[in-house]
Amino acid sequence: MPASKELRAIIDAIPPDFADPAADYLAVRAMFAPFHSRPVSEHLQVRLLEYGGVRCGDYALEAHSSHRVAFHCHGGAFVSTPLDEYHFYAEMIARHTDCRVVMPDYRLAPEHPYPAAHDDCFNAYCGLVESGVEPRNIVLIGESCGGSLAVGLLLRLRDAGLPMPACFVSLTGWFDLSVSEEIGERGDPVLTPEWVRNRGRDYVAGKIALDDPRVSPAFADLTGLPPLYLQVGQFDTVGNGAARLAVNALHCGVEATMESWPGMIQGWHGLVNEQVPEAVAAWERIRAYIVHNAG
């Protein structure tokens, strides 16, 4: 199934050098800035708090009625984007899931390499639970590189014997930093495998291998994790890592559901405000999954 005309128009407007493999982290931040720094509505309540010593955004829409909390590990290829430039994504999650949203302002690479972001997400989640939020009411969401951070959080909670969230939702999550299996027929028109690997290198900083299970949970022992719901685009550069994670999860006895969306690319969920029909449909399925699995 080809992409909708709305999505095609957005893709066609992206410069051909959008994800230049030679770009450094500063160029990546500049590249993402106009996409991430979007206005939010007056109906979004934004509180900047600390959970577990980590600065977080705590968001709710005025019409919010659910007791569920979405703990969101945001994307940005580990090097971008600071919380203050990412409020729009929290509003998008809140609007389409009816959840309160908590998003940690984790430290960015390369100034703060591994395990800084993983540590911040873990500490923020634990602080949220300590604040009185029941884990059974928490939905863990990971977008792009936030997928690695989110599943890494689950593994750390499991190993520490701490309560885990009700379920995990992946929005084109990146679970294999090495991109060891590339899309065969045609790659993502936005992100190239080498660009993605370079962002992984920015994060690991030579401390561990790109395919180390601590940063690439597609290769980890996933035994004991909560249910996983993975949405991936047909042409997503990191999509095969999600497929590997799903198969691995099933082999470990974990409930896992993966959907490959025809014609979709990395990050299409973020285009829901542009009324891209595939993004609208994806969020409808995510909301149904959350209602069924959390709280």
Image (spheres, helix red, strand yellow):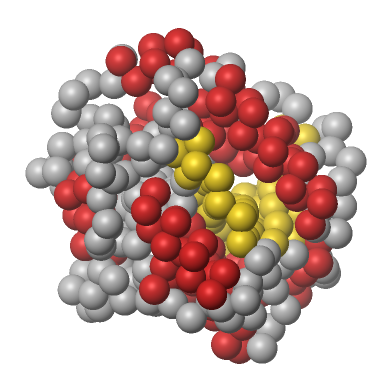
Image vertical order of residue 283 relative to residue 245, above or below: above
- Return the residue found at the far left: 22
Q: Residue at x 65, y 35 (%)?
A: 283
Q: Residue at x 70, y 57 (%)?
A: 139
Q: Residue at x 16, y 28 (%)?
A: 17
Q: Residue at x 44, y 56 (%)?
A: 242
Image quadrant where residue 142 sits: bottom right
Q: Is residue 124 visible in the rendered structure shown here?
A: yes
Tally of numbered tags: 0
Seen from the viewer's position, the closer of residues 1 and 289 is 1
Left or right position of 65 against 82: right
Seen from the viewer's position, the closer of residues 112 and 114 is 114
Q: Residue 207: x, y in percent? A: 23, 78
Q: Quadrant of the C terminus?
A: bottom right
Left or right position of 51 against 111: right
Q: Residue 67: x, y in percent? A: 87, 52
Image vertical order of residue 59 relative to residue 162, above or below: above
Q: Is residue 106 visible in the rendered structure shown here?
A: no
Q: Residue 256: x, y in percent? A: 61, 61
Left or right position of 174 against 74: left
Left or right position of 21 against 62: left
Image vertical order of residue 22 relative to residue 142, above or below: above
